[in-house]
Image (spheres, rainbow, N blue to C red):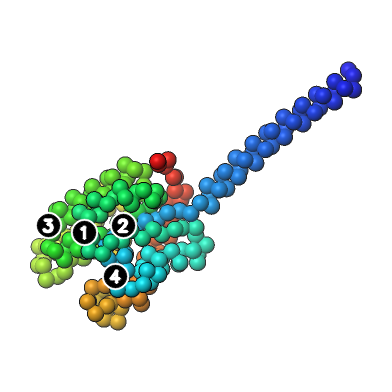
Amino acid sequence: MSLVIAYGRFAARVNSLLVVLLLGIGAVSGAVHSQIAPLKLAILGDSLAAGFGVKPAEAFPARLEVALKAQGRNVTVLNHGVSGDTTAGGLDRLDWMLADKPDIVLIELGANDALRGTDPAVTEKNLTAMVEKLKAAGVQVWLAGMYAPRNLGPEYVTAFDGLYKRIADKYQLPLYPFILDGVAQDPALILADGLHPNPKGAQIVADKLLPFVTKNLDDAAPVHRPARP
C-alpha cells in the first residue's frame, strides 16, 4: 500500500470521527438548552393574583417567582390574574393564556363566583371545563381553593367549599385548599376593603404557597414540554 493511499484512508477516518463528534456536541448543546429554558408556571386567577391594591411586584405571583429563583429554580411565574374575574371569565380567556405556552397552570378562581352567589354547580362546571381543556392541551393543572362567605348559609357553603376537592379528586390534581390561608380576616394583612391582601399579606400568601409549589414541581419533574404551535 502506498503512503498516499494510507494517508488518504487515515484522513477520511479522522474526518468521519470529527463529524460524529460535532453532531454529538450539537445534541448535547440542544439538550442543555432545553434544560435551562425556564419552566413556565401560569397563575390563572382573579384580583388576588392580579394584585388589586398593591404594586405588581408585590402581588403573590411576583413574590412566588422571587422565592423560587432564590432556591435556584429556573421558573417563570406568569401572572394571568384579572380583577373581578369569575370562573366563566377564566374559561373564556383560556386560549389567550395558552398563547404563552405555560407548562403548568395554577387555577385560582371562584372567589367572585361566591361573592355573587353563583350556583356552586355552575362554578364547578366552569372549573371542570378549564381542567379538561388544559389537560387536552398537554398542560399540567394545579388547583387553588376558595371558601364561600359564611353569610350565604350552610347549604351554599358546603356545596361551594367542597367543589374544589371534588374536582381535584376526580382529575388527580394537586390542591392547595385555601389561597388566603393565614391571611383572610386578619386586619393587619388585609386592605381596608376587607377582601384583598395588602403587601404584607401578599407576601404571606406567597410564603405559604411556596412549599406546595416546590413539592409539586419536584413530584412532577421532569416536566415534558408538549409541542405546541
Asked whether the residues under the numbered discs 2 and 3 touch, taking CB atoms below 8 Å apart as contact, a structural biologist would say no
Q: Which residue is mark 3?
A: 119
CA–CA distance between discs 2 and 4? 15 Å
CA–CA distance between discs 4 and 3? 25 Å
Q: Which residue is mark 1?
A: 86
> How would you rate the neighbour count of disc 3 (Cα within 10 Å): few for under 14, some for 14-19, many for 20 or more?
few
- The image position of residue 2, as x and y in percent, is 90, 19
Q: Quadrant of the N terminus?
A: top right
Could you tell me the amino acid type at mark 4?
Phe
Secondary element at tag 3: loop
Q: Earlier in the sequence, mark 2 or mark 3?
A: 2
> How would you rate the neighbour count of disc 1 (Cα within 10 Å): few for under 14, some for 14-19, many for 20 or more?
many
Foreground tag (2 vs 4): 4
- The image position of residue 76, as x and y in percent, is 44, 58
Is residue 207 depicted above or below 25 in this figure? Answer: below
Residue sitting nearer the eye, 143 or 48? 48
Asked whether the residues under the numbered discs 1 and 3 touch, taking CB atoms below 8 Å apart as contact, a structural biologist would say no
Residue sitting nearer the eye, 165 or 26? 26
Residue appearing at x 42%, y 54% in the figure = 40
Secondary element at tag 4: loop
Q: Which residue is mark 2?
A: 44
- The image position of residue 207, as x and y in percent, is 39, 70
The reply to whether residue 102 is in sight is yes
Q: Tell whether 168 sits left or right of 210.
A: left
Residue appearing at x 45%, y 53% in the figure = 39
- The image position of residue 116, as x and y in percent, is 14, 64
Q: Earlier in the sequence, mark 1 or mark 3?
A: 1
Q: Which mark is residue 49?
A: none
Q: Earlier in the sequence, mark 2 or mark 4?
A: 2
CA–CA distance between discs 2 and 1? 11 Å
The reply to whether residue 171 is in sight is no
